[in-house]
Amino acid sequence: MMEAKVPTTPTKRTMLGWCAVLVTLVLLVSGCGTNFGTTDDGKQKYRWKMTVTTGSTSTWYLAAERFAKSLEEETNGRITLKVFGNERLSAGEATAGVEQLMDGAKDFSYNSPIIYSAVDPRFGAVTAPFIFDTVEEGQEALAGPGGDVYADYLSEHGVHLLGFGESGMRQLTNSHHPIHTPDDLHGLKFRIPGFGLYTDLYRALGSNPTTMPFGEVFTALQQGAIDGQENPIDVIHSANLQEVQPYLTLWNYSYDPLVFGVNEKLFESLDAEDQELVSRLAEDTNEFQIKENRDREKELIAELEDSGMEVNRLTDSEKKEFREELKPLYAEYREVWGKDMSEAFIPEGL
């Protein structure tokens, strides 16, 4: 399957790649998860780093800051954690950021499974289109065998799973007209996450998908280089996309949890007490983030409407039309996702 190419010049692609490499090298040299001696009672001190893809007003960032504050308070400053928004440790490149976590160049991250899918496409099963009607259904699937499968696969890549937050259902914005049917997407150029499922999905719906770092999306929309994009409401709002996108389609087409990951070697190097502390505070962080995200979503949609955005809510029959259009895609991707992921997340009959 061919993925859409990033619409940047060779020079810009080269610069982005070298920036990510240089930042990673600096982090490796400086030593993430570095210990800073011991306390008087012999406990190891740590200075950790965590990244999120979004900016400081997002629930991702707020939850990460809560985690950092709790770590410092509960250890009387023995453990500190610095949070970096907008994937600053990988020059804005989310996939490079996940690879840093896997390699041990940073310590913790909140990332969408979509980003992990760029490394291993099996992770994309949970975000497949129109398999969940509500966020509660998605959360329930992850609380069962699907979460165990995820943990096993993450461990294969050097990441220990600390549970799941939630970005919510992914929605669609564009600059041309309301979207109600697959025909409404024909010919529009959408920025999508850079992995095969979404490329094939949007092509199947007749649009022209393209990929680019999220940090470039606002300018590309503003300049008309692309017609639209898709993301959860929290991301759309925190990026101020209402300033450059007049149409919002609420179609709940893809459930997007957040993987709270820690580098596995770092986690395994901790003593039992610190492992329990990290796991407990991570669970609290995820619960906080999910509640904040769900509580804020209606408010954020109202704010987007008040700003002049036209909000269109798809009916169940309209969603069914999209699902029917995409049926061949499910059959094709079951082999990509593998038996365990498919059985955990993809309903029978799709």
Image (tube, rainbow, N blue to C red):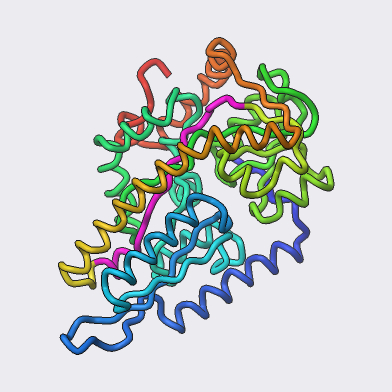
For the C terminus, give its image quadrant: top left
252 in the magenta segment: yes
**Residue 260 coordinates in the image, percent (x, y):** 38, 53
Q: Which residues are magenta?
A: 250-267
Q: Farthest residue in the right direction?
A: 223
Residue 239 belongs to the span the image colors magenta: no
Dividing the picture into quarters, in which one does residue 230 lie?
Answer: top right
Please indicate whether residue 288 sits to the left or right of residue 275 in the image: right
- Asked if residue 269 is positioned above or below residue 55 in the image, the reply reads below
Is residue 195 toward the left or the right of residue 113 in the image?
right
Residue at the image position 59 percent from the left and 47 percent from the top: 194
Height in image: 20 above or below 321? below
| 138 lies above or below 243 | above
At 48% from the left edge and 42% from the top edge, which residue is drawn? 167
**Residue at left offset 55%, top offset 21%:** 326
Q: Is residue 53 left or right of residue 176?
A: left
The residue at 43%/59% (across/down) is: 64
